[in-house]
Amino acid sequence: MVLYLQTVQTLPGQSQCMQSVLCMLYSAAMQFLPLSSFPRVATGDPEIVRKALGAAYNGADVDINPHHEFSAIHNCIEFDRISVHYAEMSTGFRLRTSSLRNTLTLYIVLEGEMTVHARAMEIACTPGGCAAMLDFPRPVALTQRRAHKILFLRMRRHALEDALTRLLGSPIQAPLVFTPAVDLASPGPRHLCALLTRLVELFDREPAMLRLRPLAARYEDLLLAAILTCLPHNHRHRLDTATQPGVPKVVRMAEAYLEANAEKTLRMADLARSVGMGTRSIQMAFRRHRGYSPSHFLRECRLARARHLLAQAAPGTTVLAVALTCGFGSQSHFTLCYRNRFGETPYETLRKSCL
């Protein structure tokens, strides 16, 4: 696996987390490059980089911009289920890859700018601005127009879904789907960047720790948990509630019943019979321990399922069919709830999936 670049300065307007990352890299660069204890590629030959990028992305088509003093560096630390990379290049490139359904990659640009084109989506990744979390369900184009530096994480889908199952304490009903555009100024991504900065610094100073497998596995678990709890995805509502302490059994039973039957027409009386408690007591338990009603949780389950179906829709799928499949009786009500939750209409999500 090979990738990206070099140069470090803190720019005005960058988020605190990205300033922290850049400051760490700058101080490290005075003595050695980030992850220099784990070198992969250091070359002045663009053909070596082109072949390495192509191999890392399953035969991707790679074009590297001409440069009279070409240089590229790629360092990488590999755990069993996730790998952390630092890359820099003295020029830009364009990479067009096919579907890589079993691999997810988080791209954090430290210098320069990377543009992601996937379906009808375009993400401009900039230092301290936006990062990209991609699962490559369809062909994706990555473009760097000039010299750049980037930190990125690659992980297997099954590793994240297994970690999510452990955190939730029960199997997930729908595949894990991340929001592709990540706002680095928001709290969750900021916390992840802070953790990633410390992890890179730690293993750079103590590379022998990677050979201590039980210890390395704990850091890997921590990183997977941070990704799942800090980045937006379709199971975040369950994860947020599952981590709250002191939640009574009746609330967890009610949530399990609602999620398992979300596509059905449900009444509070049905829920009361399933958990053996009165409707008023259930409502009060949710308000006290969750801060919202059972109907709110049911709607979140339905919306998460709908977004997954729309994002993976086959040709001919309609918004109405998805709405009915997920338990919404009104298409207009579904559209309103969906737009309020995800910031786009279900038609827009469906259109992207068909491109």
Image (spheres, helix red, strand yellow):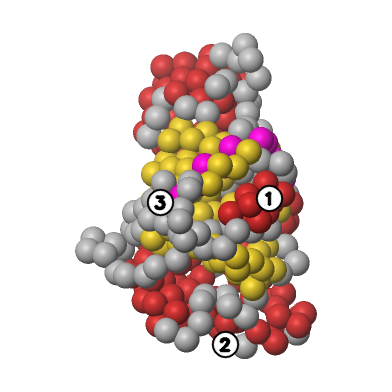
- For the record, the magenta segment spans 92-102
From the viewer's perspective, tell me whether residue 188 is left or right of residue 302: left
Residue beneath label 3, please? 146
Residue at figure coordinates x 41%, y 25% from the top left: 345
Which residue is tagged 1? 51
Q: Quadrant of the C terminus?
A: top right
Could you tell me residue 19's position as x and y percent?
A: 33, 70
The 10 Å Cα crowd at callout 2, few under 14, some 14 to 19, many 20 or more, is few
Q: Residues within 10 Å of mark 1 (few under 14, many from 20)?
A: some
In which quadrant will I find the N terminus?
bottom right
Number of the label disc, if any, that sits on residue 22: none
Disc 3 marks a residue whose amino acid type is Arg
Look at the picture and state if 180 lies above or below 24.
above
The mark lying in front, picked from 2 and 1, is 1
Mark nearest the camera among 3 and 2 is: 3
Which residue is at 59% across, 37% downward?
A: 96
Q: Above or below — where is 103 with respect to 75?
A: above
**Badges 2 and 1: C-beta atoms under 8 Å apart?**
no
| Residue 252: x %, y % from top left | 62, 53
Please name the residue that numbered disc 2 is placed on. Answer: 205
Residue 249 seen in the current view: no
Q: Mark 1 falls on what kind of element?
A: helix
Depth check, front residue: 108 or 223: 108
Amino acid marked by disc 1: Lys
- Pick the residue in front: 50 or 351: 50
Query: Front-most of 1 and 314?
Result: 1
Tag 2's secondary structure? helix
Q: Position of residue 298 (x, y in %)?
A: 53, 37
Residue 201 in view in this figure: yes
